[in-house]
Image (cartoon, rainbow, N blue to C red):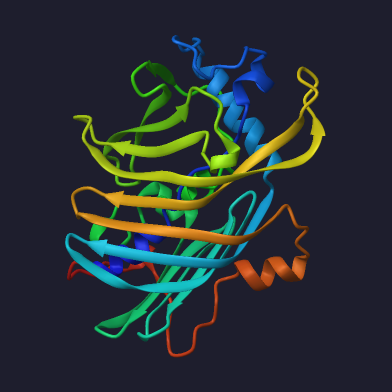
């Protein structure tokens, strides 16, 4: 299952977004060195995420490096590229240099897919509609806790509904805000999701990310998986904030650590050569985000297949 975990975890990607966010969005004075963290509400944090998502319509990375390990075992690096666009378009393609390995993960508004090939594994190519996956009809092999929309959430391209039962707590020691809310996996298992924000202004010169990590915890509060933003880049995206007069900015991740606690699996994504908010033509969208035709591989619909020895 190690290669399968690589396939699934690659889909989890991870977060991004923002700088000088407290000052520019809420008019609060600079926080650096302040002994106390100003109070914010869950609505404030959700509004921040949604404002940032509105500024990042598309992104593509021309240079992606995937590094992974399971326990003490390290796997060869894969190199490739990644593209994403709102509302639900995503594509990650990477392959090995010294080893004959390849992954192809993708999504569009109707469906998502995952292809993996490695020297010691039979190639696997699966797909499902989002509706089948969300209803629990389609399940990923190994019952890995993966949600395709986490890809877009991690990149900062998801808008959050205002009416979820969010809560927010302040961690004075870590100087962070933690936004959380109850949820369930597609299989119906209760979980709690969290997003951790820096309370102080992120230091753009040090490539610091304002959104530090995304987590999923089980009912007992134990982490199931997390995505931590190790580095992010901050850029202007046009227009000025009416309160501060400063340009609106957006962040995108340049290094992400992904960890699955029970499987002791960890993966690092290094994301370079980014292009932000480039206009995609209909042909670009079809080429990048359609279910690919991969030579010698037949896609299997997960709504009608099981990998536990049973079929349907």
Above/below status of 79 relative to 128:
below
Residue 87, x across and y down, in percent: 63, 49
Above/below status of 211 relative to 294:
above
Question: Camera-side residue: 18 or 279?
Answer: 18
Residue 182, x across and y down, in percent: 36, 28
* Quadrant occupied by the C terminus: bottom left
Seen in the image, is 48 located left or right of residue 263?
A: right
Q: How many marks?
A: 0
Find residue 245 and report its image quarter: top right
Find residue 109 and report its image quarter: bottom right
Q: Is residue 141 visible?
A: no
Question: Camera-side residue: 212 or 116?
Answer: 212
Going 66% across and 31% down the picture, which residue do you hit? 51
Residue 212, x across and y down, in percent: 44, 36
Seen in the image, is 124 located left or right of residue 26?
A: left
Q: Is residue 86 visible?
A: yes
* Quadrant occupied by the N terminus: bottom left
Going 72% across and 69% down the picture, which residue do you hit? 284
Above/below status of 150 relative to 201:
below
Going 65% across and 15% down the picture, which residue do you hit? 26
Find residue 273 and report its image quarter: bottom right
Residue 30, x across and y down, in percent: 60, 16
């Amino acid at each position: 299952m190690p290669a399968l975990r690589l396939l699934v975890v690659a889909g989890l990607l991870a977060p991004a977004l923002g700088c000088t966010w407290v000052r520019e969005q809420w008019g609060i004075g600079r926080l650096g060195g302040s002994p106390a963290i100003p109070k914010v509400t869950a609505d404030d944090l959700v509004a921040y995420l949604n404002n940032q998502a509105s500024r990042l319509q598309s992104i593509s990375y021309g240079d992606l490096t995937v590094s992974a390990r399971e326990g003490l075992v390290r796997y060869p690096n894969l190199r490739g590229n990644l593209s994403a666009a709102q509302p639900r378009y995503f594509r990650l393609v990477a392959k090995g240099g010294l080893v004959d390995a390849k992954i192809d993960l993708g999504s569009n508004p109707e469906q998502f897919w995952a292809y993996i090939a490695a020297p010691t594994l039979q190639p696997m190519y699966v797909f499902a509609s989002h509706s089948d996956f969300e209803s629990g009809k389609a399940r990923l092999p190994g019952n890995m806790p993966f949600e395709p929309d986490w890809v877009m959430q991690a990149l900062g391209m998801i808008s959050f509904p205002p009416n979820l039962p969010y809560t927010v707590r302040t961690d004075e020691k870590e100087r962070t805000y933690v936004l959380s809310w109850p949820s369930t996996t597609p299989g119906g298992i209760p979980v709690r999701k969290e997003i951790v924000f820096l309370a102080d202004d992120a230091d753009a010169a040090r490539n610091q990310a304002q959104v530090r990590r995304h987590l999923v915890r089980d009912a007992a509060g134990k982490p199931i998986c997390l995505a931590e933003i190790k580095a992010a880049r901050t850029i202007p995206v046009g227009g000025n904030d009416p309160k501060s007069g400063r340009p609106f900015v957006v962040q995108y991740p340049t290094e992400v650590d992904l960890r699955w606690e029970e499987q002791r699996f960890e993966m690092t994504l290094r994301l370079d050569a980014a292009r932000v908010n480039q206009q995609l033509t209909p042909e670009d969208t079809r080429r990048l985000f359609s279910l690919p035709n991969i030579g010698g591989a037949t896609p299997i619909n997960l709504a009608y297949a099981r990998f536990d020895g049973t079929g349907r």
